[in-house]
Amino acid sequence: MLATRYWLPPDISSHGSAIDNLIAYLHVFMAILFVGWGIFFIYCLIKFRARAGHLARYDDVKAKPSKYAEVLVVAIEAVLLVGISMPVWASYRNEPPKDDPLIVRMVAQQFAWNIHYPGPDGKFGRTEPKLVNEISNPIGLDRDGDPAAADDVVSINNFHVPKGRDVVVRLSSKDVIHSFAVPLLRVKQDVIPGMEIPVWFKAVKSNDEVREAMTTTVALPTSEADIEPFAHKHRGDVFMGDFGQGAAGQPLAARGGWVTKETIAALVQAKVVEVAVAPKDPVNIQCAQLCGLGHYRMLGQMQILEPDAFTQWLESQTGGAEEFIDDE
Amino acid sequence: MSSDHGHHHEPGFIRKYLFSVDHKVIGVQYAVTSLVFLFIGFSLMMIMRWQLAYPSAPIPFIGGWLASAVQGVVDKTGTLLPEGYNALGAMHGTIMVFLGVVPLAVGGFGNYVMPLQIGAPDMAFPRLNMASYWVFLPGGIIMLASFFVPGGAANSGWTAYPPLSVTANVTGTNPFWNGQTMWLLGMIFLITSSLLGSVNFIVTIVHLRVKGLQLFRMPFFVWAQFVTAFLLLLAFPPLEAAGVMQLMDRVFDTSFFMPSGLVVSGQLQEYSGGGSPLLWQHLFWFLAHPEVYVLILPAIGIVGEVIANNTRKPLWGYRVLVYSIIFLGFMSFVVWAHHMFLTGMGTTLSTFFQTTTMIISVPSVVILTAFLLSLYGAAIRFTVPMLFAIAFLPMFAIGGLTGLPLGLSASDIHLHDTYYVIGHFHYVVAPGTIMALFAGIYYWFPKVTGRKMNDFLGKLHFWPTLIFMNAVFMPMFFVGLQGVSRRLWDQTSYVTGNETHNWVKMSSWGAWMLGLSQLPFIINFFYSAFAGKKVAANPWAATTLEWAAPSPPPHGNFPEVPVVYRGPYEYSVPGSRQDYSPQHVPDAKLA
């Protein structure tokens, strides 16, 4: 199982645990402060409520304990700041990884993520805003004019990366500010038009591994009226096993098949009680900066593949003057 | 002397109630107007929360009306459109901050109470005061009118980041009368109004204090308004300038904020280019960070007044409190880029802003601790204002504490632009500031009207409000920790959003129940204004100067100019006959 802490999502990155630890320490500190204040607060409300014979004290409460507490609070904040947050930010963000990272460009637009791979020659072909064609050439790649562009691969919304290798993403935008966010990778970077901003990460789990780890067993609905809402809730999910049996002995729901209203209805009819499901694409790319009416559906998918599978995928895309638009 | 404005005849209705220069009338105008805006702003959110809880379901009751009455908000089935969601969201933020909370806290409470608390007959510049209200109101009307123009209201967030804000609301619309342009015009009016007001507040507090009212005898509320006025005066001008620049980018195709080579919907944009979207962010946040202290300081001031009065003892650490808010005011100008940690900021800059942000948390902790210590050794009266003031303390604590993970850049990587942020700032403003403002309304209502608000209705307002405020905003921390982004018309298309949807439903139901919980307040407010129990000048047995004036005070405020003999919170002074020693009563008369 993927470990999750408190309400954090699973962390499948190499740098994320430092961030998660900081968040955890912070919340423990916050809880201690809140509970400490709270106990004093409730104590005062009860002990010092106005009642017959009880008078208020005019003189100032001597505040030695609170002075010490105050100094302690500042000291802990200083430790969190200088001892943890600054080093974590510096170690993660100061320099891009040097150890043979995969370098890609990502061009965000309303409302999709265009990923641009340099191809076997390792060089990005020239792009030019004037060449942009929303259907055939969303990033304005100069395929005809620039020889380096011939082997470039452009993918839309599905960001294929190899597991266990550093990836550097050079982010830019065609139109408005977006923000490339992958919560499970603890990555977030604003994408600002007019700037090219790099962000990097290393995924330590593949999509398949994440999907396995996210598998949950859910009870099927018992009444027909609940089938539609159930199917809607699980519309991004696939079955993580074979369930039910049809007339010819084949499973009603096969491993890897989409959860659909019809399949659920068939399973319910066959009196299947529960199924195991998981999101088909469990590592989402979210846009984290309001970018227009399609902001909510600027959804991309990380496709984290084993290194061999990734190489295979990249090779299948490369070559040919045709723009391969991979839009599963 | 106090009513000596030269020859003075009774003004007609228009001069007395509409275009009045009396700070009390202006204060009530601000308060009533801003309460209406608060109600409107909150209603926008109640509509949005339907879409969040029940995505793509038509809005009940009013969906049909919305489809016919306003542009671009719902489709013909009455379902909220994505662009409509964005418009309601942008206007909710704008209306609540600039038309609701600040005008109530500063224009309403500040205007009405502050001159009374310093013994002044009015503001230093009464006509300027009138002007500031009558510049505020058109600004608000322009903002509301923007819902009814083609393309609908502004929908690029209250933050209005370009290039989105420059390229939005343009298709098929008039170059001038469209939502975002009207938003910019409205902001220019509102900012101007604030600037006029802040000058007035500063001069009044510096020059019009009565004899004996040294700076460190001023009520804490006046100090809070004083610092707030400086924040408004110094922080707003860059945003006004930026607003004009964005207006020019929209209307005259300049490129202050527009970089070269933009392709929007497949069209190469015809700007000269070379501009920077980041410039807007810096100019905006240079105001908007001090602005959040503008939102909280008057509330802290009100809480101080109500706590002192209802603990029957001086506030703990009055000087510490004053120095804390002054320090807070200074620091508020050097933290702004903590809103921009993820814009590609380097380590040096993020280190600077993290450090200043951590430093600014210290005075907030000090203030909260001072208020808590004020409860120690007290004789606490649980009046309705005190209930709200007491509840403010843990709510502000939650809001302030949840700022810490956001203020550190490393943890902000995960939490930036998620629901955690929304939970954080709402805790400070909603169960924080707004509850403090309620405390102020219940507290000063007798001074304004000569009548008390009903206590039973007050408690019926308080308890559900407290419970449902938490029901709305506490779940947002869990949703945010999961990584769910802000400003999403439908969160369920994301795995993380799908999994946290039950929390979203809880927030929505909490919001609707919170709306219902305000009914006792609305009824109480209007009923008591006309038929509430009549009270004398000082029903709370308070010490500060406003209670020395009649309820309500006449034009000119004090029949006799008061003189101040002591500090603002001389309650339960040992050896005195009563448990309070008003500021304006000489020692001889006290015993």
Image (cartoon, rainbow, N blue to C red):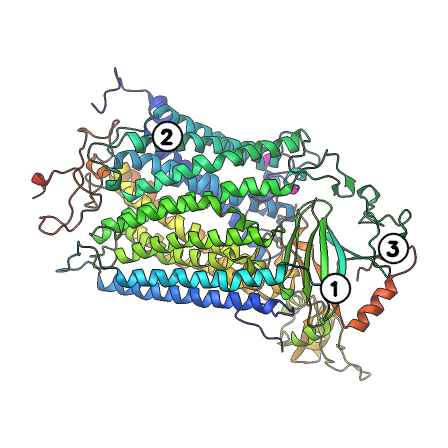
The residue lying toward the viewer, choosing from A181 and B8, is: A181
**Residue B417 in which image quadrant:** bottom right
Q: Would you place residue B275 above or below residue B334 in this image?
A: above
Asked whether disc 3 touches disc 2, contact meaning CB atoms under 8 Å apart, the reply is no
Give the residue at mark 3. A323
Q: Using a 10 Å C-alpha cutoff, classify the residue at mark 1 as few (fewer than 14 neighbours), some (14 to 19) or many (20 or more).
A: some
Give the residue at mark 1. A101
- Mark 1 or 3: the one toward you: 1
Q: Decide if residue B117 is on the left or right side of residue B480.
A: left
Q: Using a 10 Å C-alpha cutoff, classify the residue at mark 3 as few (fewer than 14 neighbours), some (14 to 19) or many (20 or more).
A: some
Dominant secondary structure, magenta? loop
Give the residue at mark 2. B200
Q: Amino acid at mark 2?
A: Asn
Q: Closer to the N terminus: mark 1 or mark 3?
A: 1
Asked whether disc 1 touches disc 2, contact meaning CB atoms under 8 Å apart, the reply is no
Are labels 3 and 2 on one chain? no
Can the viewer see residue B508?
no
**Residue B127 in which image quadrant:** top left
- Mark 1 or 2: the one toward you: 1
Percent from the top left, x then y, of residue B81? 64, 48
Q: Decide if residue A12 is on the left or right side of residue B590.
A: right
